[in-house]
Image (spheres, grey):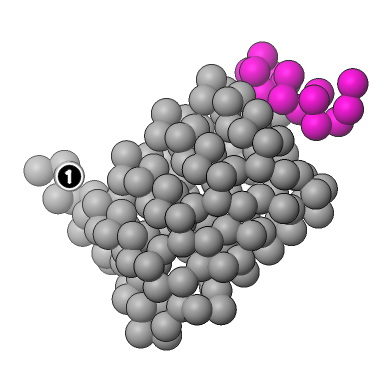
Amino acid sequence: MSQFNREIQRLKENDPTLTGIKLWGSGLCDCGVLRLSDALKVNTTLRALKLWGSGIGDRGVLGLSDALKVNTTLRALHLQGSEIGDCGVLGLSDALKVNTTLRALHLQGGEIGDCGVLGLSDALKVNIGLEKLHLQGGEISKELLDKVYKLVTPKAILERRNRRER
């Protein structure tokens, strides 16, 4: 059994010792990420998923987005150096509207443009969990990046949390 298949099995079994998975530079494709996403839907132990420099594209990220809508334990998602575009970021944005447990999202690189970042901005206006966002892409305007980063300042997050408690 490959290392990847072992990790999937451990995820599905909720192995309490499995709190992080590092698959950076693994050449993991969207099909592999979809398998991983299915396991994340039932997992209650994983805290960090690091998929740096993988071949993940929008299709794989849309699968991860579906998992984030129901997963309540993942705290950090590292997707930098992937092939994610606006479509994938819009999927993540939808997930962030309901996921309150993800604390850090790393999206440097990829094909992310202003369209995806606008969707992310809308999600961050209601999200009360995300505290760290690392975002870079070749087609993102500086003005929009500044706007998004203001939404993840401690003050902005506290204001949204306080509004939700009222």
Kindly identify the residue that appears in the image at 73 percent across and 53 percent down. 54
Kindly identify the residue that appears in the image at 42 percent across and 85 percent down. 142
Q: Amino acid at mark 1?
A: Arg
Res 114 → quadrant: bottom left
Kindly identify the residue that appears in the image at 33 percent across and 66 percent down. 118
Res 131 → quadrant: bottom left
Q: Residue furthest left?
A: 166
> 42 left or right of 4?
left
Q: Is residue 120 magenta?
A: no
Residue 162 x %, y %: 18, 50
Residue 11 x %, y %: 67, 23
Pick whichever, 100 or 33, lies toward us: 33
Instruction: Please identify the quadrant where the N terminus is shown.
Output: top right
Residue under pointer 1: 164
> 122 left or right of 3?
left
Q: Which residues are magenta?
A: 1-17
Residue 88 x %, y %: 49, 53
Residue 66: tell me if it is visible: yes
Q: Residue furthest bottom?
A: 142
Residue 81 x %, y %: 68, 63
Residue 146, placed above or below residue 13: below
Q: Secondary structure at mark 1?
A: helix
Q: Is residue 6 magenta?
A: yes
Kindly identify the residue that appears in the image at 9 percent across and 43 percent down. 166
